[in-house]
Image (spheres, rainbow, N blue to C red):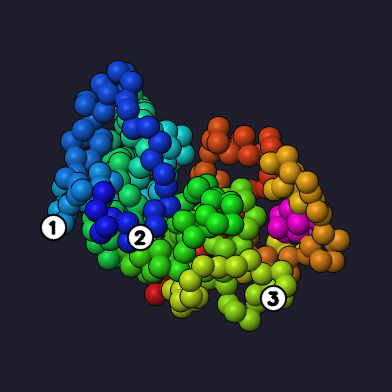
Amino acid sequence: MSEQHHRRLLSFVRRSNRLKPSYQRAWDAALGHELLDVPTAERDTAVAEGFDIDWAGEYGRTAPLIVEIGSGSGEAVAAAAAHNPDVDFLAIEVYRPGAAQLASRIRREGLSNVRVACLDAVEVLDKLLPASSVAELWVFFPDPWHKSKHKKRRLVQPAFVEKAARVIAPTGVWRLATDWADYAVQMREVIGAPSSLMRPAQTRQRVHGPRTSANLFWNPHAGERTGQDSPLTQVRAGDLDAASLGKPTHPLPLQEALDHEGGWAPRYAARVVTDFEQKALDAGRKVFDLTFLRKP
């Protein structure tokens, strides 16, 4: 891999991309149909320079577009597409077996309003999606990279917020969910938390990169679910993330654990509980939902 493709830290690590025979058949049948056939660069998750997509031609119509990053096997996006036939969906999944499984699910369920891109999400946002073309962007349970030395690899960083802001239409929606408290705090801070509402310095989570996105999105739930009603307070008071990993816990006294900022959204009703999320709940972690609106 050339030096050019090492310049940007990737938010994912590709596991084995070998497809078992049934997935290979699903891939071959869906390629060019449910699965986008995109020429790639030297890195097979990167889009070849100069390639673009006529999205109205791809879906055969003009309709609101919802983009989900990290769709996995497609439980969430398939359910949403089935209930919203007048909306188009683009599922981005970098893991080939997951993309093949999702394409197979789409074909099996007869969903004509979903396309799958087995590509780096940053490449899709930068090269394939026109400005203001996305009605909603979903980032549900991205890789948390919870070790301190790896947090720089997290997807939701200030630079990514700017990319998201370019493609999301004015007043469009960005929905996020994570089961890791410190990543939830990072999302809240880099996307839309006013600096005047940040927690005291001794309890802040370190955010990689400058805070450059405060004027791009606003949180319609700002100030909601604070204090003892905040899931963040509950995590801190019980050190639930450490407990879920079987590590020694160091719960904070309630007064130190209190989340005075809040801003957590109610659970998004259209987000089905996937097997992945259920495992997190079974392990004792809390799920944080966030919703941001693109400023006009």
Which amino acid is tagged 3?
Ala
Q: Residues within 10 Å of mark 3 (few under 14, many from 20)?
A: few
Mark 2 lies on residue: 8
Distance of label 3 from label 2 (alpha carbons): 29 Å
Mark 1 lies on residue: 50
Of the pair 95 and 166, the residue shown nearer to us: 95
Magenta region: which residues? 228-237
Q: Nearer the viewer, mark 1 or mark 2?
A: 2
Of the pair 21 and 267, the residue shown nearer to us: 21
Q: In the displayed structure, does residue 36 sit left or right of residue 110?
A: left
Which amino acid is tagged 1?
Gly
The earlier-in-sequence mark between 3 and 1 is 1
Q: Is residue 233 magenta?
A: yes
Q: Can you name the residue that lies furthest to the bottom here? A: 196
- Res 81 visible: no
Q: Residues within 10 Å of mark 1 (few under 14, many from 20)?
A: few
Position of 76 relative to 219 (above/below): above
Q: Position of residue 105 (x, y in %)?
A: 36, 28
Q: Position of residue 4 (x, y in %)?
A: 25, 59
The kind of secondary structure element at disc 2 is loop
Q: Position of residue 85 (x, y in %)?
A: 35, 40
The kind of secondary structure element at disc 3 is helix
The earlier-in-sequence mark between 1 and 2 is 2
The earlier-in-sequence mark between 3 and 2 is 2
Q: Nearer the viewer, mark 3 or mark 2?
A: 2
Q: Which quarter of the rendering shows the C terminus?
A: bottom left
Total marks shown come to 3
Mark 3 lies on residue: 201
Position of 134 relative to 70 (above/below): below
Of the pair 266 and 186, the residue shown nearer to us: 186
Q: Main secondary structure of the magenta part?
A: helix
The kind of secondary structure element at disc 1 is loop
